[in-house]
Amino acid sequence: MPHFKFEPRKELEYLSERMKQFVEEFPESFQVEFGKEYAPRVEIVQTDNNVHVNIELPGVDRSDISLTIKDNTLIVSGEKKLIADENANITLSERAYGPFNREILLPEKVDREKIQAKFDAGVLTVTLVKIVPDSAREINIDID
């Protein structure tokens, strides 16, 4: 029968290192919902010239949404309000309500003067135009 030497201190150090790796590799965009707090889902789609940020806000009124940009971060905040009458007896609710605040780090430098936002069918779509550095642009040079 093979013998294995068990060293608790080394095992704990190994476990600690693995936990650190797990936390570092955990995706930033991953969200776990606890309780009934509302956190809108976000999707970022890039094209050659634009960054499109789609934010799901079903049941949120346009007047309850605030959209700002600071540095390279898009900030969406607001509140999803309870629709039912305060005196109503809710027998089942799987919906989430309340204030929300999402800070979305943008993947590219964007032109702050050319930001467009559209709210349609419960989805807020923010279109941002990418800034292409002069050094990245291709320029044809005529040869004499």
Image: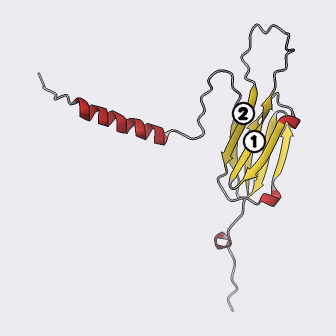
- Residue type at mark 2 is Pro
For the point 69% across and 83% down, the residue is: 141
Label 1 packing within 10 angstroms: few (<14), some (14-19), many (20+): some
Against 47, residue 20 (above or below) is above
How is the structure coloured here? secondary structure
The x, y position of residue 57, in whole percent, is 78, 33
Of labels 1 and 2, earlier in sequence is: 2
**Furthest-bottom residue in this view:** 144
Q: Secondary structure at mark 1?
A: strand
- Along the viewing direction, whichever of 138 and 18 lies nearer the viewer: 18
Q: Which mark is residue 97?
A: none
Q: Are marks 1 and 2 in contact (CB under 8 Å)?
A: yes
Against 42, residue 87 (above or below) is above
> In this rendering, would 77 be left or right of 23?
right
**Badge 2 is on which residue?**
40
Dividing the image into 4 quarters, which one contains the N terminus?
Answer: top left
**Furthest-left residue in this view:** 1
